[in-house]
Amino acid sequence: MPEFAIEVRDVVKHYRTPGRGEVHALDGVSIAVEPGRVLGIVGESGCGKSTLARVLTRLERPDSGRIEVLGQPVTTARGAALRELRRTIQLVFQDPYASLDPRQRVGDALTEVLSVHRIHETAASLLDLVGLPASTAGRYPHQLSGGQRQRVGIARALAVRPKVLVLDEPVSALDVSVRAEIINLLSSLRDELALTFVFISHDLGMVRHLADDIAVMYLGKIVEYGPWQPVSDAPRHPYTRALQAAVPIADPQHDRVRQIHTVAGEVPDAANPPAGCRFHPRCPLVEDICRRDEPPLLPATGGYQLACHVVQRDLATSGATPANSGSAATTNTGNAAPSGGVR
């Protein structure tokens, strides 16, 4: 077994668009996920999350960089190697209705996958795996609820018995009442099938329910990376603090007294990213060095990484590190979401 289920090194993906120039979707992204763990990737729309999902699953090819899934090279896979890769890693799409053929019954959609990959399993067994009755096979997508359609999408991805699932905003199109059910289903499937997940979302509060580690992306780069608890409960990067502030808290008294870290302005154009730190036009901590030099993603203790000139300097001065400063920032080295489901 390879050390990492997913290993991404310095991946770059630019899109050339007429009249706009090159859109910098990914600019030197590196991640590594151990087998059986969940990496949550969070950030605003346009930060490159979905592009990363597509290059991981070879729906897109990166311009440069290296990607391996369970030791298999992704970018150079051809023929039988590419077919084997398709069975190793699968993508669950954001919109369960758009990802299903409206003219095809659910059972036919699942049977088609099984037939192409010559897998001796039934559509009924796949539906049972995701908590749907066998009668669902005779229905069309429009006859199902959003949560049922997403369960079908998960069943289709699992039909080829993958080891890795990339989940691109799998609950954002669902009603709030259904999201916890899907998260609990994914948690159970992870334990039952020994799966590795890359869970993508714009919602830091949702990611923390499933992830062991969290990578925060901004305009094609990772700005904070570490175990779920310090990143979600005691973030250090000003952008991650703003994402945390956007997560509603059920306790009104706590919500009134908590410190809110807001950012002004809109995300810059990815075809013309700012010099230096890409977050500096919106950052409340901005200094001259931020406008001039791009901050590296520097490692700290506990597997924590941070890309911020100001915070890294302040931590170095105080002798603290992002992973051990603050009472809430204790790392979680085990599974973030045990089989009990949503935290």
Image (cartoon, rainbow, N blue to C red):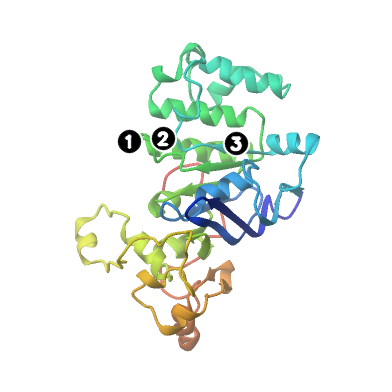
| Residue 309 locus on image (x, y percent) | 48, 79
Q: Quadrant of residue 108?
A: top right
In the structure shown, which secondary structural element does the residue marked by tag 1 occupy? helix
Mark 3 Cα within 10 Å, few/some/many (few <14, many 20+)? few
Q: Which residue is mark 2?
A: 181
Q: Which residue is mark 3?
A: 192
Which disc is residue 35 wearing? Answer: none
Of the image marks 3 and 1, the number of the one nearer the N terminus: 1
Of the image marks 2 and 3, the number of the one nearer the N terminus: 2
Q: Residue at x 48, y 80 (%)?
A: 292
* Residue that protrudes farthest toward the front in the picture: 19
| Residue 281 locus on image (x, y percent) | 37, 71
In the structure shown, which secondary structural element does the residue marked by tag 2 occupy? helix
Choose between 298 and 98: the one closer to the eye. Answer: 98
Mark 3 vs mark 1: in front: 1
Report the Cα–Cα distance between label 2 and label 1.
Answer: 8 Å
| Discs 2, 1 touching: Cβ within 8 Å | yes
Choose between 281 and 186: the one closer to the eye. Answer: 281
Q: Is residue 133 above or below residue 321?
A: above
Report the Cα–Cα distance between label 2 and label 3.
Answer: 16 Å
Viewer can see residue 124: no
Left or right of residue 258, residue 107 in this image: right
Which disc is residue 177 wearing? Answer: 1
